[in-house]
Image (cartoon, helix red, strand yellow):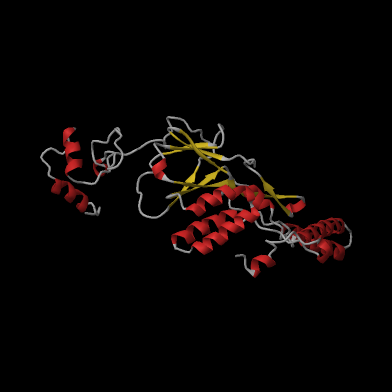
Amino acid sequence: MLDEFDRARGLERDNEPTGHGYVVSRSDLALAHLLAAAANQQLGRDDEASDHLERVRMQRPQLSDLCDRVESKQYDTLLVVEMGIGPVRAPSGEDGTEAELWYRWPSDRRALAVFDHRGEVGRFARVLDVNAFADAYRWDHLAPVRRAKSGLGTLMTGVGAGLVLSDDDDARWAGLGLLLGGLAAKATAHADARSLSVLPQRYYLVPILMSEIEGVVELRIGDGPGESMLVPGLELGRRDGVRLIVVRVPANALATASDAWAGARYANDWEPFVIDGGDLPYILGGRCVMTPGPEALAKYQASGHLMGWTSADLRELYRAEGVVVEG
């Protein structure tokens, strides 16, 4: 149920006319509501989760399918996918009185396609466009003040420069004061152009059931740089409840079969891949991070390493280096 506060913000009515000097604007908080819904589900607050999803359906009808998927609870992994490079603010205008947005990655409505080795698993609509979100910023009520300071500073420096050339000593001193004051006014008329430059350009939310996934997951919106990524190992570390995993797609890379991130880099207890250097423990300079025990030791000794060692010796090596091994 939407409460009175939501109604006051205009979620259930059209924008107000401008006769009162303002227009009610609806903030696009779909991503926040979806994450809040998933969190409330895990806390057993299904009613609150439904309220958040209903807000998303009202504000963004194109996300209704995603809301239905979240509400069904038919997922055990929630991927928050970040793509692209977000906008930054840059000074513009005379004396930098304006802070203009610089869009470093174009906006579009492409859906995110999710694949495993069998083919496409599903498509998910874009949840947040950071370009549009940043462009909705309106509370720059100091802009007229900055422009006035810049104009006044320009006038003062012009008059001051003219008086400095006068033959009258008092006029020259007055001109110098006006010149310095004008320069100070212009120097303090800059807009605040600070921005969080590490933000992505867009967010997708992908609820998936790992029992329905086979192999490495691929995320793709296109074939250009930064538009696709292979995500291996999602089946690892599964436990009761829903996992939240944030995936940042490198903005200037192409996903190919030889991606550095598209396979295991270290031999481990879960993946049966053959890794170069995986026949020696990481602690001794190799690329194996298996739990020290009989299975790991047998693997090392089969390659001619650590001959004559026991499992207790291997565990003692880790303990001596300050590595705590459970079990």
Q: Looking at the image, which residue is at 87% across and 56% down? A: 162
- Residue furthest bottom in the image: 4
Q: Is residue 218 left or right of residue 308?
A: right
Picture layout, residue 186 above or below residue 65? below
The picture places residue 155, in percent across and down from the top left corner, at 84, 58
Q: Is residue 191 visible?
A: yes
Q: Can residue 200 be seen in this view?
A: no
The picture places residue 28, in percent across and down from the top left corner, at 64, 55
Picture layout, residue 237 above or below residue 188? above
Q: Is residue 197 left or right of residue 7?
A: left
In which quadrant is the N terminus drawn? bottom right
Question: Image quarter for residue 112?
Answer: top right
Q: In this view, does 174 lie to the left or right of 6?
A: right
Q: Looking at the image, which residue is at 42% across and 50% down? A: 76
In which quadrant is the C terminus drawn? bottom left
The picture places residue 10, in percent across and down from the top left corner, at 70, 63
State the residue in front, 133 or 90: 133
The picture places residue 134, in percent across and down from the top left corner, at 65, 52
